[in-house]
């Protein structure tokens, strides 16, 4: 690909950061569901190219970003670090609020950071077809763009409630050449079985993952891609935090608190892990806050146990905070935050007490999003609105305490394809839902027992 000269391109990081190298204790390994022994590269080879498998299992601190990936990153990276001065004024707070604007990528979200990398490693191994799932469509559209760039065919299983709530993300995927099915679908046995049991099944990420995995194993020559949860995905997203560290230093505004939404965990890890490295090294006292929906509270109500990553129990067993692999979420509009579990590596970081977690209701997030749009001019994705909600809360707390602090949050994507969600909010049709603890207790009876 021809290189471009872009102002500031020299600031694009040349390496991804792997926090595993700096943690006081290593994370628990994935387990083969048949043997209950640690899963090795050969166990993952049917699903992923070896380049990604090696990153998944790596303990190396840094990984070089391939030059061809950087060439594509130059289309939108480095992304801006923006001070939200109008929002500060509206809140009358002494706090300084900054956001890393990942919405400027061609697909409109942070997902492009790993989509391009995953498509590259598949192309390098000669793989020409990928199957994947998507929740709200950010991942599916990002991977569709990346696969088009690398000449790879893509099939996407999109959670049915989002397939209907967010039709224009489906349009983006199709524009880039992807085949898109609502999940559960008639294209897999897993999907047909789910529909036979409940014809009105709205779907879940766990179910869509099962469909994508079945698609891969029944189509020789296909590989699987995942937009969050796994170590290599979190690794690719750390380009966000690496850029943000330098930008905050240039602005003389190193953050006192870093905030991000958490669903599978990749966007929060992406901005937080590089800053957390500096805290582990004793350089800072920065706090880290992951924000999840009350409707899908894997960190705040889930259990830290081994569980499957999908409904059909086809994945390796992963130790993570989980609500149970058969979890069926409420149809909240933050479709990217409806996964039943949290990334194992981020779960491990949380279990070590290196970050905080808070769950917030849907309506309060949309209220925060409306204020952000009115002051900063950007309509945020519903997922990003969760981070905005807590950033505002932190700024109001600073006002109450009469202290100044630097607040940084990750704006993971824009909401221009989520306007149906905003229509529902403006019409007063959105409702809050708090996932009950007793349902978590019940789900734990279906989680495999690992000695």
Image (tube, helix red, strand yellow):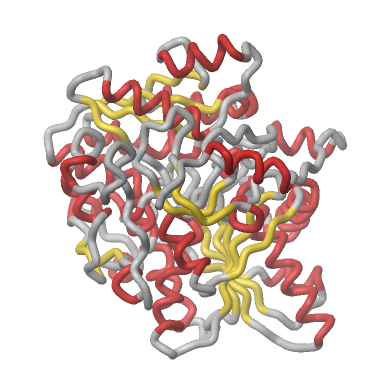
Q: Name the outermost residue toward the right.
A: 428
The answer to whether one can see residue 265 in this image is: yes
Quadrant for residue 353, please give it.
bottom right
Label tally: 0
Residue 273's x, y, as percent? 43, 69
Residue 255's x, y, as percent? 56, 79
Q: Is residue 62 left or right of residue 282?
A: left
For the residue pair 103 and 327, the one nearer the viewer reads as 327
Residue name at image x 64 percent, y 42 percent? 334
The answer to whether one can see residue 378 in this image is: no
For the residue pair 134 and 427, the one nearer the viewer reads as 134
For the residue pair 132 and 146, the one nearer the viewer reads as 132
Residue 138's x, y, as percent? 49, 39
The relative height of residue 224 versus residue 251 in the rendered view (above or below) is above
Residue name at image x 39 percent, y 86 percent? 281
Quadrant for residue 323, please give it.
top right
The relative height of residue 444 versus residue 130 in the rendered view (above or below) is below
Q: Name the outermost residue toward the front.
A: 451
Q: Is residue 261 left or right of residue 437?
A: left
For the residue pair 226 and 6, the one nearer the viewer reads as 226
Residue 166's x, y, as percent? 60, 29
The relative height of residue 309 versus residue 286 in the rendered view (above or below) is above
Q: Is residue 258 left or right of residue 37?
A: right
Residue name at image x 26 percent, y 36 percent? 149
Residue name at image x 37 percent, y 78 percent? 24
């Amino acid at each position: 690909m021809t290189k471009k000269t872009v102002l500031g391109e020299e600031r694009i990081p040349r390496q991804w950061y792997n926090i595993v190298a700096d943690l006081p204790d290593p994370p628990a390994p994935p387990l083969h569901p048949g043997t209950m022994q640690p899963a090795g590269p050969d166990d993952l080879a049917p699903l992923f190219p070896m380049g990604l498998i090696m990153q998944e299992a790596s303990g190396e601190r840094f990984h070089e970003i391939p030059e061809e990936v950087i060439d594509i990153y130059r289309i939108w990276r480095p992304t801006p670090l923006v001070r939200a001065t109008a929002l500060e004024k509206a809140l009358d707070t002494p706090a300084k609020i900054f956001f890393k604007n990942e919405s400027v990528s061609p697909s409109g979200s942070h997902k492009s950071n790993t989509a391009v990398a995953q498509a590259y490693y598949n192309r390098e191994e000669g793989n020409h077809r990928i199957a994947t799932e998507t929740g709200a469509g950010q991942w599916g559209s990002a991977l569709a763009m990346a696969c088009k760039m690398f000449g790879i065919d893509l099939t996407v299983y999109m959670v049915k409630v989002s397939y209907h709530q967010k039709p224009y993300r489906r349009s983006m995927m199709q524009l880039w050449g992807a085949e898109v099915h609502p999940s559960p679908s008639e294209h897999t046995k897993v999907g047909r079985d789910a529909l036979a049991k409940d014809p009105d099944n709205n779907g879940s990420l766990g179910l869509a993952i099962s469909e994508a995995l079945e698609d891969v194993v029944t189509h020789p020559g296909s590989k699987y891609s995942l937009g969050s949860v796994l170590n290599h995905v979190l690794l690719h997203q750390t380009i966000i935090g690496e850029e943000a560290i330098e930008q905050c230093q240039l602005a003389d505004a190193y953050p006192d608190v870093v905030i991000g939404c958490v669903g599978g965990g990749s966007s929060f890890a992406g901005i937080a892990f590089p800053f957390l490295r500096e805290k582990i090294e004793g350089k800072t006292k920065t706090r880290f806050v992951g924000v999840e929906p009350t409707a899908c509270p894997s960190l705040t109500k889930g259990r830290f146990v081994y569980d499957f990553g999908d409904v059909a129990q086809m994945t390796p067993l992963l130790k993570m905070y989980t609500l149970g692999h058969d979890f069926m979420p409420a149809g909240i509009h933050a479709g990217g935050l409806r996964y039943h579990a949290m990334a194992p590596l981020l779960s491990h970081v949380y279990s070590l007490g290196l970050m905080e977690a808070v769950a917030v209701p849907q309506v309060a997030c949309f209220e925060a999003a409306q204020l952000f749009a009115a002051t900063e001019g950007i309509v945020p994705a519903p997922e990003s609105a969760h981070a905005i909600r807590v950033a505002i809360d932190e700024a109001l707390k600073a006002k109450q305490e009469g202290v100044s602090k630097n607040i940084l949050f990750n704006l993971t994507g824009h909401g221009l394809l989520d306007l149906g969600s905003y229509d529902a909010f403006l019409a007063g049709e959105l409702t809050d839902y708090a996932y009950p603890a007793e349902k978590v207790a019940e789900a734990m009876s279906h989680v495999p027992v690992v000695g």
